[in-house]
Image (tube, helix red, strand yellow):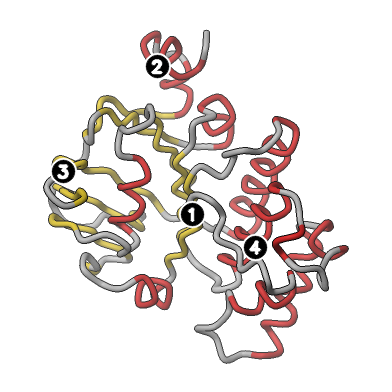
Amino acid sequence: MPGGGELMADELLRVDGLDAGYGPVQVLRGLGFTVDEGEIVVILGANGAGKTTTLRAVSGMLPASGSVRFKGQEVLGRRPDQLCSLGMAHVPQGRGTITDLTVDENLRLGAYTRKDHAEISADVASWYDTFPRLGERRDQAAGSMSGGEQQMLAIARALMSRPTLLLLDEPSLGLAPLVTKELFARIADINRERGTAVLVVEQNANLALSVAARGYVLETGQILTSGTAEELQNDDAVRQAYLGR
């Protein structure tokens, strides 16, 4: 687990001593981790370990104490919209698409912090190329689409703000295995082609580690172990607990 100190040259996000919870219930206890520029990092853990709470605290959705440094500056306590303007986007668990709006309207809403209207339209067209099914359903209400299509829309909408860091909370939740595999392939493509860093919380450890550079295992609000994706895949305790082998 990383300690305190100055932001390293390639570090995009550094979390130190993060405490957070709900009312009297403390969930996170001195949490610390980093995400480098252009890197995919996965946080693994059982239900109740504090994975979702971690993303909520980092993205400003939940009060917390400690330190969250993003692009070299302390951002703990800032509102989610302020963090979005700085380049952090969060796709919460349950997708959060606006069901009554069309696909196209949802995407354009994701660019609410931007003023470059011509480039916004170009980005919408680009996401239709990345997720062809969204292009086919551009005039369809988001709530009428399948779960997998809504998850793709939620990710594309978050990326409309052109973030440098994308937070993904259980993107595979409720999706069929083939849809999940396609979704993670697109996430890997986006990371490789656009350089967007990704911090993903995920139950499907095998798939998440297949696209990640590094990972952390969370247990009762603390980092139990960490390492490269390959190291975690070869760790006997991690394999038995999370990889089913």
Label 2 and label 1: CA atoms lie apart by 24 Å
Label 2 and label 4: CA atoms lie apart by 31 Å
Answer with the quarter of the image where residue 7 lies: bottom left
Give whichever of discs 4 and 1 has the lower sequence position: 4
Kindly identify the amino acid type of the residue bearing the numbered disc 1: Ala
Check the image and report above or below for 132 versus 118: above
Check the image and report above or below for 119 versus 27: below
Identify the element where label 2 is drawn: helix
Identify the element where label 1 is drawn: strand
Residue drawn 50% across the image and 83% down it:
113
Q: Image check: 36 left or right of 148?
A: left
Kindly identify the amino acid type of the residue bearing the numbered disc 4: Ala
Q: Nearer the viewer, residue 5 or 96?
A: 96
Q: Residue 84 appears at what percent x and percent y?
A: 42, 72
Label 3 and label 2: CA atoms lie apart by 27 Å
Residue where numbered disc 1 is placed: 197
Q: Which mark is residue 156?
A: 4
Give whichever of discs 2 and 4 has the lower sequence position: 4
Q: Residue 186 appears at what percent x and percent y?
A: 69, 48
Check the image and report above or below for 85 versus 188: below
Quadrant in which the N terminus is drawn: top left
Q: Residue 142 appears at what percent x and percent y?
A: 71, 64
